Amino acid sequence: MNISTVNSGELVWCEKIKYLGIDLAAAKVFKCSYDNAKRKFYGAFNAIFEKIGRTVSEEVIIQLLKSKCLPVLFYGLDVCPCSNQIRSLDHAVHSCFRKKFQ
C-alpha cells in the first residue's frame, strides 16, 4: 500500500527503516527492532572468539565482550523503548557466556 503525496508522488510503505543506525519498526506505537543489533553483536563476539578461541583467561574474554561487543548491542537503547524486549537482549549476552563457559 503506497501513500500518495500532494505533488502526485508516492511514498512506499515499509515494515522497517534505519535512521541514524537504529531500526525503527512499523507499529501502532513507537517501536524499535533489535534484530540487526543482535546480529552484529553475535558477529563481533564470534570474530573475537574465532581469533582467541579458548586459549585466554575468562577475565580477558569478559573484558573484550564488555569493551567491543556490548557497545554494538547497546547502541541506541537510550532513545528506544525496550521494556518488552529486554529478555531478548539478555538472551544474546547469556548465549555468548554459555558458548565460552559451557
Image (tube, helix red, strand yellow):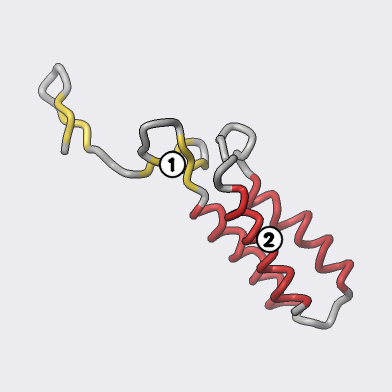
**Depth order, front residue of 87/6:** 87
Q: Which mark is residue 93?
A: 2
Give percent across and percent down for residue 94.
69, 64
Q: Which mark is residue 18?
A: 1
Identify the residue shown where x is 14% and y is 26%: 4
Q: SS at mark 2? A: helix
N-term mark: 1 or 2: 1
- Type of amino acid at the residue the image marks with label 2: Val
Q: Residue furthest left?
A: 8
Q: Which quadrant is home to the C terminus?
A: bottom right
Q: Is residue 9 above or below residue 37?
A: above
Identify the residue shown where x is 79% and y is 82%: 54
Check contact, mark 1 vs mark 2: CB within 8 A.
no
- Please give left or right for residue 66 compared with residue 82 in the image: right
Q: Between label 1 and label 2, give the one nearer the viewer.
A: 2
Give percent across and percent down for residue 29.
42, 31
Q: Is residue 43 above or below residue 102?
A: above
Give the total number of marks visible in the rendering: 2
Give percent across and percent down for residue 22.
51, 41
Q: Is residue 80 above or below residue 52?
A: above
Identify the residue shown where x is 63% and y is 61%: 92
Identify the residue shown where x is 49% and y is 54%: 35
- Type of amino acid at the residue the image marks with label 1: Lys
- Please give left or right for residue 99 compared with residue 67 in the image: left
Q: Which quadrant is home to the N terminus?
A: top left
Q: Quadrant of residue 52?
A: bottom right
Give percent across and percent down for residue 58.
86, 72
Q: Which mark is residue 47?
A: none
Question: Between marks 1 and 2, how big is the CA–CA gap?
Answer: 23 Å
